[in-house]
Amino acid sequence: QHLFSHVELAPRDPILGLNEAYNADTRATKVNLGVGVYYDANGKLPLLKAVREAEATRIQGAPARGYLPIEGIAAYDQAVQNLLFGAESSLISAGRVATFQAIGGTGGLKIGADFLQRLNPQAKVLISDPSWENHRALFENAGFTVETYPYYDAQTRGVNFAGMLQALEQAAAGTIVVLHACCHNPTGADLSAEEWQRIIAVAQARELVPFLDMAYQGFGDGIKEDAIALDLFAASGLNFFISSSFSKSFSLYGERVGALTVVTDGKDETARVVSQVKRVIRTNYSNPPTHGATVVATVLNTPALRSMWENELAEMRERIRAMRAGLVEKLQAAGVTQDFSFVLRQRGMFSYSGLTASQVDRLREEFGIYAVSSGRICVAALNQQNLDYVVQAIASVVR
Ligand code: PMP
């Protein structure tokens, strides 16, 4: 019996590999811009005050840990819907929305993908070029063929909207289109409201299945502002999917707090969809964990904690903005003639910096500054202590 003798070594996750190399680096000045998490002004992963308070209350109550319902905590699922669509949403009152607590945003994508695979196994999935690196693997693992639609335009440092639209116009009916609702990962380039309207018109005309990935609500322009795509889709009458995550907005990465939300035609359809998605969840992991979702539901549903969280989220958002501005200003002051002002137009944690793979190599080798080879940098890993060093290093490799 040699069960594992033919098992091949899988390729390393490129970003986790980067973290390992960073950890092994002994230079005191090293900076990790390859990460996908928010660090505070001191370069630390924050534990939000609102989270700390909700956790303290929960621990004090010493609750027993029974199983949750398959679809998760009802108050959490309701709070997710309210955050996505607004508490006054007519979609919610019409019973057109089903939300399932999920194991992070990734879990929301996965149970959505598994449900879609049962509905239409032949459907193709389109993801943006480029996209979050797990989108392709996740939908392929669920049994789909995954292709891309044009998205990033390196020339304009914005969205190749004509290319994107054309690809969607050519897609077969039933094609699942994964869209980043805001704060596109990895580019930071988002669609305007007018562009979203045109995507919606194509989705309607071509009978596409939109799957909106909302991993950064509140990191762009604000909680409501970042949900503009959701508002427009909600008004369109389309059926669509949303995966959402509190990993970033609550800094609760390891608690795996996310959701899948499905918009149907009405109450009766919702009940049938719920029954089927519950089967998907039951056969994957049975039911979700208690802690993270309890904390998030407590914060969202307790006015004092809610406003505390909104302030902390605004602080994170504004600090990222300040780092974007600082980077652009200081690069200019350092004599870099290349225009970096596009960094200010980008939204969310990331910037496609325009740095080439060989410039990224030089940053790492000569300066101990780690970035993804695509040139993606995490702006949220910059702070007042490392900004000047990073600027000098970039200035020296782009010269
Ligand atoms: N989608 C996108 C676009 C992301 O960037 C991420 C997190 N990096 C996720 C989904 C997954 O989020 P979570 O960690 O909550 O599973």
Image (cartoon, grey):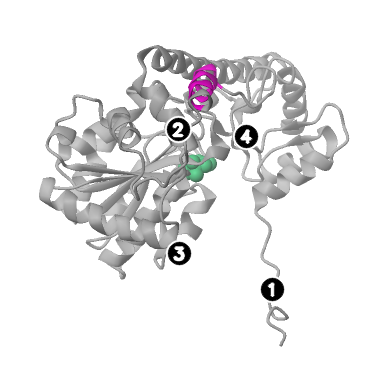
Q: Say which residue appears at 18% left-offset and 34% top-offset.
A: 92
**3D distance between C-alphas at marks 4 and 2:** 16 Å
Whole-percent x, y for residue 44 in the image = 68, 24
Residue carrying label 4: 377
Counting residues from the N terminus, which is met first, the one under dot 3 or under dot 1? 1
* Circles 4 and 2: CB atoms closer than 8 Å: no
Residue carrying label 1: 8
Tally of numbered discs: 4
**3D distance between C-alphas at marks 2 and 1:** 35 Å
Q: Magenta residues, as a range? A: 48-58
> On the picture, is 147 further left or further right than 322?
left
Q: Of circles 3 and 4, which is in front? A: 3
Mark 1 lies on a secondary structure that is loop
Observer able to see residue 213: no
Q: Residues within 10 Å of mark 3 (few under 14, many from 20)?
A: some
Residue carrying label 2: 216
Mark 2 lies on a secondary structure that is loop
Near-viewer residue (91 or 186):
91
Q: Residues within 10 Å of mark 2 (few under 14, many from 20)?
A: many
> On the picture, is 363 further left or further right than 72?
right
Counting residues from the N terminus, which is met first, the one under dot 3 or under dot 4? 3
**Quadrant of the frame with the N terminus:** bottom right
Q: Say which residue appears at 32% left-offset and 30% top-offset.
A: 79
> On the picture, is 176 further left or further right than 325?
left
What amino acid is at disc 3? Glu
In terms of image quadrants, where is residue 125?
Answer: bottom left
